[in-house]
Amino acid sequence: MSTSVSSTSSTTSNYYLLNTGTSSSLQVSGLASGIDVDSIVNKLMQAESVPLDTMNQKLQLLEWQRDDYRTMSSDLSDLLSTVNTMTLTSSYSKAATVSDSSKVTVTPASGAGNGTYTISDATLATAAMTYSDDAIVTFTDPDLKKTTNFDPTKPLFAQADNLKNGISWENNTDYVDSPEKFSVSADGATFQLSNGAVDVDSAEIRIDGNLINKVEDKSDLDSESTDYQVYIDPITGQMNFNRDVEADSEITASYQYSTVNINMTTYDSSGVEKDIAFDANASMSLNSILQKINSYGTVNTFYDSTSKRVSVSATATGDLNQNGNDITFNSPFLKTTLGMTTAVNGSDAKVTVNGMVIQPASNTFTINNTTFTLNAEIPSTQTVTVGIDTDTDGMFDKIKSFVDQYNDIIGKINDMISVAPDRDYSPLTSAQKAQMSDTDISNWNEKARQGTLYNDNILTSVLNKMRQNIYSTISGITGGSYSQLSQIGISTSSDYTAHGKLVLDESKLKSAIATDPDSVMKLFTSGNSSSSDPSSQGIAKRLFNTITNAVSQIKTQAGTTSLVNDQFNIGRSINDLSDQISSFQDHLKMIQTRYYTQFTAMESAIESANSQASYLSSMFSS
C-alpha cells in the first residue's frame, strides 16, 4: 500500500481546537506579542490529545470486532438452518412414478416403503347433497321466470313477502324482562340496538328512567321539541333521537324482535354427529345465514341467483351416517322456506389395490405412508401402476449442497482466526483521514481491520468440534449399514491448507444412496438431539447442537442488531470506553481553556509593558 500517514497535520492547524471545544471569549490574536496563539495551542493540544486518539482507535477496533462476530454468527445461522432440515427424516423424500396421473395422484412421505402398487376397479366417493325442491322466491311472471326484487344480501325481514313459502318467524323476548342498556359516553342522537327485525309497537325506550315518545316515521322527529322523541328502524334496529342524548346518560330499551330458527343434523368426516342449531336474527340476509351454517364446517351451502335455489352438500365424502341420513333438516325455515327435503347420502369410494378391495370414505387415502388420491373412476379392465422409490437425485443434491455450505463456513472461520493483526496499520484518527482520499481510507481500513478475531476461542472451539462431529463414528444406528461419512464418499481433505474441508466422491455417494438410501439418511438423522452422548447422534444432529451453542456464545459476546449495548460483553466495553472518551474530552476542554487563559495573561502583561515603555520613551524624549 503506497499511502503514507503522518501523526499530525499542518494543514489542519485548528483540528484539535475545533474538536475539543474552545471558549471564544478567552482566545487572543497575539496582537501585542505577534505570536500565532491558535497555532501554538493547537500543537500543544495535539500532544495532549494523543490518549484520546488511542481511545478512539480502541473503540473502532471493538466495533469492528463486534461486526465481524455478527457476520460469523449470520453465516453459522445459515448453516444451522440447513443442518436443522437435515435432522428431519421428512427432508429425505421419496419419489413416485404413476402410469396414469389423470386417474391417480400419489404423494409418498419420507417413511414410505419402496414398492409397486396396481390400482383398478375404482369408483369415487361422493358427498351427501341436496337442493331446494323449486325456486324459493315468487315469480311475477312464471313464463319468463321474472321474480320479485329478492336480494340475498339484504335483510330477510324486509323481503319475507318475496319468498314463495314465507317465513315462520319466532318472537324473541330476551330484552323484555331484562332491557338492553346503553351508557352514553359522548353526546349523540343515534344508537344501535343489538338486534334488527324489531317489534316497534312493543318497544319501550327510556332515558335515565323516563319513557320516550316514539314516532312512526323518521321525518316526524321534531328537533325543536324540548322533549325527547325517538324513531326505531324496524329492520335494522337503529334508534334515532330528535336531539342529542347527553353524555353520562343511560338508555334502556325493552323490545321484542323476530328470529329465524336454524336446525339441522350433520356428520363430520369421522362420522361424528354435529348439530347445527342457532337463532338467526331476521335482519340477517340469506347469504349471511348460509355463511354461518358453513362456519360449522360440516356442510357447504349457497344460493344460486339463476335457479333461485339453495344448495347444501356435505364437506366430507363418504357414507358418514351408516344408520340413517347424512344430513337432516329439522326447522321450518330450512324445510319449508328453503324447500329442503332429505339429502341423498354420500357414498364411500371403492378401489382394488394389489388385488385387495378397500372402501375408504374419501377419495384420498393412505397406505404404508403413501397417500393416494383418486381423480377419476378406473374400470376393471384398466390398471394404474404406481412405483415408490427413494428420490436419489434429491437426496444427493441435498447432501452435496450441505458439503459445499460446510466447506464455505470452514473457510470463513479459518480466514478469521488465522490472520493476525498488522501492527503497522492502526485505525485512522480524524486528523489522518483529513489528509486521505476515500479510496486510501478504504484500503487502509481493510488492513487495519484484519485480525479482529485472530485465534478467537469461540470460533476455534466451534471449528474443532465441527471437525469432530464430521469424522467421529456413529454408534448404535439401528438397521443402518453405514457408521461414518467416509463410507458414503465424504472424507476430510488430506491437504492441511484446507483446514478440515470435506472432499466429496460423487460417484461413491450416488452409489451408496442407490444401494441403501435409508442407511445414508440415518447417518444424518439417527439418535436424539437432546442426548448427552454425541457418539450416538447422526452427523446433522451433532452439528445442530455444536452450531447452536456457538451462535449462543457469539450472541453473549457480540449481541445482535436488536440488542442494546448493555446486553452483551463487547457492547458493555463500548459503553465504558465511550464514557472514558467523553470524560477525556471534557478534560481537554479544561486544558485548552487553561492555555488560552495563560496566553491572555501573557498578552495583557506584554501590552502593559509596551504601554509603560512608550510612556517612558516619550518622557525621555520631552
Image (tube, rainbow, N blue to C red):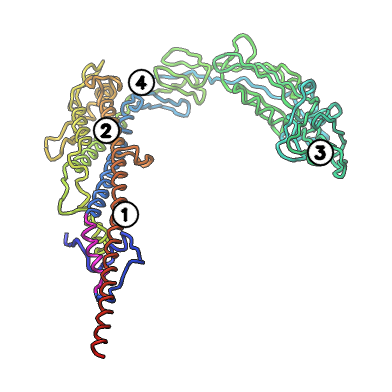
* First in residue order: circle 1 vs circle 2: 2
> Where is 7 relative to 362, above or below?
below
* First in residue order: circle 3 vs circle 4: 4
Quick one: quadrant of the N terminus? bottom left
Front label number (2 vs 4): 2
Front label number (3 vs 4): 3
Front label number (3 vs 1): 1
- Left or right: 540 in relation to 375: left
Residue that numbered label 3 is attached to: 241
Callout 2: helix, strand or loop?
helix
* First in residue order: circle 4 vs circle 1: 4
> From which residue to which does the magenta span run?
35-50
Front label number (1 vs 2): 1
Asked if disc 3 and disc 1 are in contact, CB closer than 8 Å, the reply is: no
- Left or right: 566 in relation to 222: left
Name the residue: 66% across, 16% down: 265
Residue that numbered label 1 is attached to: 586
* First in residue order: circle 2 vs circle 4: 4
* First in residue order: circle 3 vs circle 2: 3
* Residue 413 horizontal/vertical position (percent): 21, 39
Rounded to the nearest angstrom, the CA distance separating label 3 from label 4 is 70 Å
- Total numbered labels placed on residues in the image: 4
133 or 275: nearer the viewer: 275
475 or 553: nearer the viewer: 553
